[in-house]
Each structure stands twice: as structure tokens, then as C-alpha cells.
Image (spheres, rainbow, N blue to C red):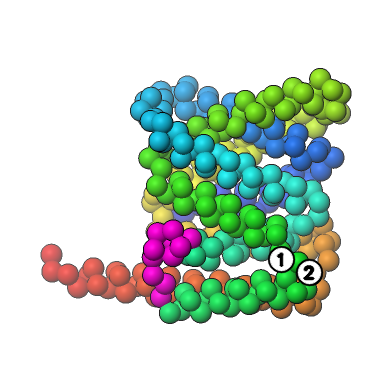
Amino acid sequence: MSRPLWYAVAAYLFWGFFPLYWGLIRHVPTGQAMGHRIVWSALVLGVLVLGSGRRQALSRVTRRVAGQYATAAVLIGVNWTIYVWAVNAGFVVETSLGYFILPLINVLLGVVVLRERLRRLQWVAVAIAAAGVAHLTRTYGAPPWIALGLAVTFGAYGLIKKQAPLPPLEGLFLETAILAPIALIYLVVEQSSGSGLFLRTGAATDLLLMGTGLLTIIPLALFAAAVQRVPLSIVGILQYISPTIQFLIGILVFREAFSRAQFIGFALVWSAVVLFGIDGLHTRRQTLAAEAAIPR
């Protein structure tokens, strides 16, 4: 495989194994874990962006662009919080469901917001996924809010980032820089009240909390290095590495319950994902064939 393809695989493997890392700091309250993730991520990104002479793009940020990134910051902050809380509360399997249905949520957002039209097979995939979510709602006695929350917040985040002008690292730095003051104030208040665990529960916990910055940035940097050189059809297939690993970790490592009724709901969603992938590959082949037929 080419180096960019390896970068993409490595990024999705990182994201897939995230639950194991967060499981090591399960004793840290979600708010504090999130605060540290934001602050340390902002510091790491600050070194990468400001220390490497890439601040020129930030100097051209207008009020409108800042508003876009502020909205993106809120969405990614909510997404991260849902994810960390869900992993630490024992809902890893449901987090995997969220990222399985994410591509279908992206399609629906494209229809609703961008007025895009779905192809027939895409409509079939969306209908099957909806049936799966409806079945899980009946099984759980309530909608799978964790999965839906993760998919919708990250889908909306991606939609905003698609229209935002900054390069990936500069954009993420701006987002974390927007969130960092709030996170830092929260952590200072927690530490002052005696509730903060940083520097109070041992060096292992401190290092793991500090490491959440690198944990966040490394896969994003790998993905950014890959996405411009790897065909989107391949990226679309590789993205299922992460939720598949998360699902297996939830079942095999954390021993989360997974009933036959849940399996039926997941199977419907997986079927929808397969149909969606088949449609994407077929459409790409048609596009390439049409381009090849154009006289040069």
C-alpha cells in the first residue's frame, strides 16, 4: 500500500482503539477529562501551528469565519463529551453504532441542508437504517440517543467544516482555542474546590490526561495527510474500521451485554451501510468510465 493509504488506516485504527485509552481514566469525571482534552489539544496544536510558521491563515480570519468555527467548536465539544461519557459509562457498543450510521446522517444532512438528491439505492439504505434504529428504539424502550447524538453532532460538524476555509490543523486549533478558556476556567474551579483529580491521584493519571492532547491530534494529523491523496471511495470504506473495532472492544473487552434483539437492529444498520458502500463504488466507477470516454 502507498504511504498515504497507510496514514489513513493508522488514523482509523487510532480512533478504533480510543475506548481502551479512555477506559484507563474511567475514574476521572467526564467534565474534567474533557477539559484536559481540550486544553492539552489546544497546546499541542498551538505548538504545531504557531511554532511552524503557519499562522498566516489565522491572520485572515473574519468575523463570519470565526462564527463558523465557533459553531464547529460547540459541535465537536458536545460530540467529544458524549463519546467520553458513553465509553466511561459502559456504552461502547452504542458509540460504534453512532459511527456506523454517520455516513447515512451525512447523506440526510446533504438532502436537508444542501438540497442534494439521493439516488434510489441511497434511499433504500436510509430506509433500512431507519428501520434498524426504530427496532433498537423498541428494544431499548427509547431511541439510541448516544448513537444518534454522536452521528448528528459529528455530521453537522463535518458539514460546517466542509464550507470553512482554513486548513485542517489551523481550523482545529481555532476551534480548541475557542473552547480552551472555558475548559481552563472549569478545571481551575475544580482544582480550587478540591474536586480536581489532576496532580492528586498519581503520575499515571496525570500523564494520561496530558496525553489526551496527543491522542486527539495524532489521528487527525494522519487523516489530514492521507485524505488529499487517497480516493474518497477508499476513505469511505476505511472509515468503518473504527466503529468495527469499537464494537468488538465493547463486546469482547468490556463485556457489554448484546442481545439477539440488539443484533437484529445492528444487522439492519450494517446492511444499510453495505448498500451505501456498493452505491458509492458503483457511482465512482460510472464517473471514471465517463471521464475516460471524454476525448483528450
What number of labels is visible? 2
Q: Residue at x 69, y 24 (%)?
A: 185
Give the labeled residue for mark 1: 143
Q: Residue at x 41, y 36 (%)?
A: 65
- Give me the C-alpha separation between circle 1 and circle 2: 7 Å
Q: Is residue 63 visible?
A: yes
Say left or right for 62 vs 258. Answer: left
Task: Please provide percent x and percent y for residue 120.
Answer: 43, 79
Task: Please provide percent x and percent y for residue 181.
Answer: 62, 25
Say left or right for 79 vs 276. Answer: right
Give the labeled residue for mark 2: 140
Q: Residue at x 42, y 49 (%)?
A: 162
Task: Please provide percent x and percent y for residue 79.
Answer: 63, 48
Identify the magenta region: 109-119
Q: How many C-alpha atoms fall within 10 Å of the one at disc 1: few (<14), some, or many (≥20)?
A: some
Judging depth in this view, the residue of 102 and 251 nearest the camera is 102
In the rendered view, would you say 161 is above or below 95? above
> Is residue 115 magenta-colored?
yes
At label 2, which amino acid type do we have? Answer: Tyr
Q: Residue at x 68, y 25 (%)?
A: 184
> Is residue 272 magenta-colored?
no
Judging depth in this view, the residue of 244 and 188 nearest the camera is 188
Task: Please provide percent x and percent y for residue 14.
Answer: 62, 48
Quadrant of the drawing holding the C terminus: bottom left
Say left or right for 148 vs 295. Answer: right
Q: Secondary structure at mark 1?
A: loop
Would you say the residues marked 1 and 2 are in contact, meaning their CB atoms lie under 8 Å apart?
yes
Judging depth in this view, the residue of 253 and 164 nearest the camera is 164
Q: Is residue 203 visible?
A: no
At label 1, which amino acid type do we have? Answer: Pro
